[in-house]
Image (tube, helix red, strand yellow):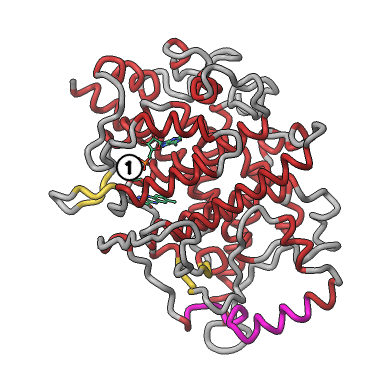
């Protein structure tokens, strides 16, 4: 209980599902608080870049797609344009480390506080939830991500993707017949929920192994015509990261769904069943992303503890309140950093298992190139709010990958490399972890909602 077994069953990790769930009971409230502080809630992002891959006219007319920009006067003074350009010059000179050195390591396009074209967005005013964005434009983006940018996995995604591209987001259909669908839903959401662990090698408590042997690799296997033997771990990781991100976005859509008849926002169980519960491998990939990002946070914790997240003004009437808020933010930040390393979670994912073979350098370059492409594909998302959260989360995962696969402990030393991560990367990393953590909490909520419907029956 409460620790990571080395043979734990989240594929490609050393963690048990119930370890992640139990940690999340503490982590989620702390993260939920953390992302409300000024350092973490303000994100500068360029939402008006052209889609570099195709002509995108996916202008989402729905007002839920809109993004509310932050007021200039609410932006902490130290980030404002003038101050920023000063900082940039001096840090480049002092460190003597070329900006390219870090760019080279990036797994994604990194938004920059100093970018003239970006707009500051207050993330708390723009929750990720149902927007109504769907249809061809959304499918084109997902298809591009899966088909064109999963190296060696285009068939995998094609197969999973093509199963239900015709399904309509607003009328959950799912490709499964009634009784099978019910059976799987019961297994995932029913009495033997994830937290009730079973033995090794079996998916704990989901009961799903009864229906589909070893589904952790099942999707990759079936999608490649049963031949996943040649599929290296790095490629599986890549696929899981993308599928986990997709699944996490779907969870947020389903848990904050707009009932168009009443105009109310509420969890939509049917949506969750058709998009997630009947596809447990998608859920598994969300847990995988949790382990991966937590490991990155735990690894970078010494660096992050030294990061300046203060935003209080130096002069004027807001000094006292600003300092108080900074203190609370620092306490919440330290709590999240220590939770990320708790209960063996910091060893839940071993980056040392990856990119070690003969072709490791090529594989890593491919991995990076394709993940960078995903961040560019985000400019093709035809709904501002979806694009905002898509960009942020790709950047957050990109930052995690950079910490895990590019930076050694020396590079992560705050004394040697104080400017290693830009503010936008830190903001993206923790907001992405918050998104994932909220998704895991939502899975538990859906389990309760489902149980209530079973009692009624
Ligand atoms: P989609 O989610 O579009 O999926 C298409 C196909 O991909 C499915 O039919 C299935 O075959 C496959 N698939 C689905 N999930 C997975 C998975 N986890 N792993 C592997 N394969 C999978 N809509 C909102 O309402 N709010 C948002 O904030 C939002 N953000 C978005 C961000 C991005 C980057 C993109 C591309 C889209 C976003 N959308 C958002 C749209 C949303 O993701 C769906 O595309 C839309 O709701 C239509 O859903 P769908 O049921 O047609 O299936």
Taking 187 as reference, is 170 left or right?
Answer: left
Image quarter of residue 328: bottom right
What's the residue at 86%, 72% (across, down)?
96
In the rendered image, which quarter contains the C terminus? top left
Q: Main secondary structure of the magenta part?
A: helix
Question: Can you give x and y, in whole percent of width and height, for residue 23 in the image?
Answer: 57, 37
Question: Can you give x and y, in whole percent of width and height, for residue 422 in the image?
Answer: 67, 65
Label 1 crowd (10 A; few <14 / some 14-19 / many >=20):
many
What's the residue at 63%, 22% (across, down)?
8
Please say if 60 is above or below 235.
below
Q: Which quadrant contains ligand 1?
A: top left
What's the residue at 80%, 60% (across, down)?
414
Q: Is residue 161 a member of the stretch shown in magenta?
A: no
- Magenta-colored span: 73-91
Taking 399 as reference, is 437 left or right?
Answer: left
| Dot 1: element | helix
Please say if 200 is above or below 415.
above
Nearer to the camera, 25 or 170: 170
Residue found farthest to the top: 210
Residue found farthest to the front: 54
Residue located beneath label 1 in the image = 254
What's the residue at 83%, 78% (across, down)?
93
In the rendered image, which quarter contains the N terminus? top right
Question: Can you give x and y, in whole percent of width and height, for residue 299 in the image?
Answer: 73, 46
Nearer to the camera, 97 or 260: 97
């Amino acid at each position: 209980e409460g620790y990571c077994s080395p043979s734990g069953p989240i594929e490609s990790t050393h963690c048990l599902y119930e370890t992640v769930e139990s940690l999340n009971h503490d982590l989620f409230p702390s993260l939920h608080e953390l992302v409300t502080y000024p350092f973490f809630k303000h994100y500068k992002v360029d939402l008006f870049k052209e889609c570099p891959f195709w002509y995108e006219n996916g202008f989402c007319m729905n007002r839920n797609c809109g993004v509310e920009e932050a007021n200039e006067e609410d932006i902490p003074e130290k980030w404002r344009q003038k101050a920023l350009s000063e900082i940039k010059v001096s840090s480049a000179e002092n460190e003597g480390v070329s900006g390219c050195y870090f760019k080279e390591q990036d797994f994604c396009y990194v938004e920059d506080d100093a970018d003239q074209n970006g707009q500051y967005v207050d993330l708390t005013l723009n929750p990720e939830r149902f927007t109504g964005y769907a249809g061809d434009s959304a499918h084109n983006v997902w298809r591009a991500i899966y088909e064109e940018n999963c190296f060696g996995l285009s068939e995998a995604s094609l197969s999973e993707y093509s199963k239900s591209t015709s399904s309509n987001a607003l009328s959950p259909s799912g490709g499964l017949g009634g009784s099978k669908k019910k059976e799987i839903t019961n297994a995932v959401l029913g009495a033997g929920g994830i937290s009730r662990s079973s033995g090794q090698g079996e998916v704990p408590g989901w009961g799903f192994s009864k229906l589909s042997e070893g589904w952790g690799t099942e999707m990759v296997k079936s999608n490649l015509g049963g031949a996943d033997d040649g599929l290296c771990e790095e490629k599986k990781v890549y696929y899981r990261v993308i599928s986990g991100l997709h699944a996490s976005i779907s969870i947020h859509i389903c848990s904050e769904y707009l009932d168009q008849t009443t105009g109310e926002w509420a969890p939509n169980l049917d949506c969750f069943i058709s998009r997630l519960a009947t596809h447990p491998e998608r859920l598994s990939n969300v847990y995988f992303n949790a382990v991966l990002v937590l490991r990155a946070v735990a690894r970078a914790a010494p660096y992050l503890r030294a990061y300046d997240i203060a935003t209080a003004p130096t002069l004027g009437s807001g000094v006292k309140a600003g300092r108080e808020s900074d203190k609370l933010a620092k306490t919440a930040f330290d709590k999240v950093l220590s939770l990320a390393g708790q209960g063996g979670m910091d060893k839940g994912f071993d980056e040392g298992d990856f990119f070690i073979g003969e072709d490791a350098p090529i594989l890593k370059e491919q991995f990076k190139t394709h993940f960078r492409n995903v961040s560019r594909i985000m400019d093709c998302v035809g709904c501002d709010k979806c694009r905002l959260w898509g960009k942020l989360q790709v950047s957050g995962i990109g930052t995690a990958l950079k910490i895990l696969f590019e930076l050694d402990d020396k590079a992560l030393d705050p004394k040697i490399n104080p400017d290693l991560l830009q503010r936008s990367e830190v903001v993206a990393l923790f907001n992405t972890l918050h998104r994932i953590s909220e998704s895991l909490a939502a899975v538990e909520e859906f389990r309760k909602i489902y149980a209530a419907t079973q009692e009624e029956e």
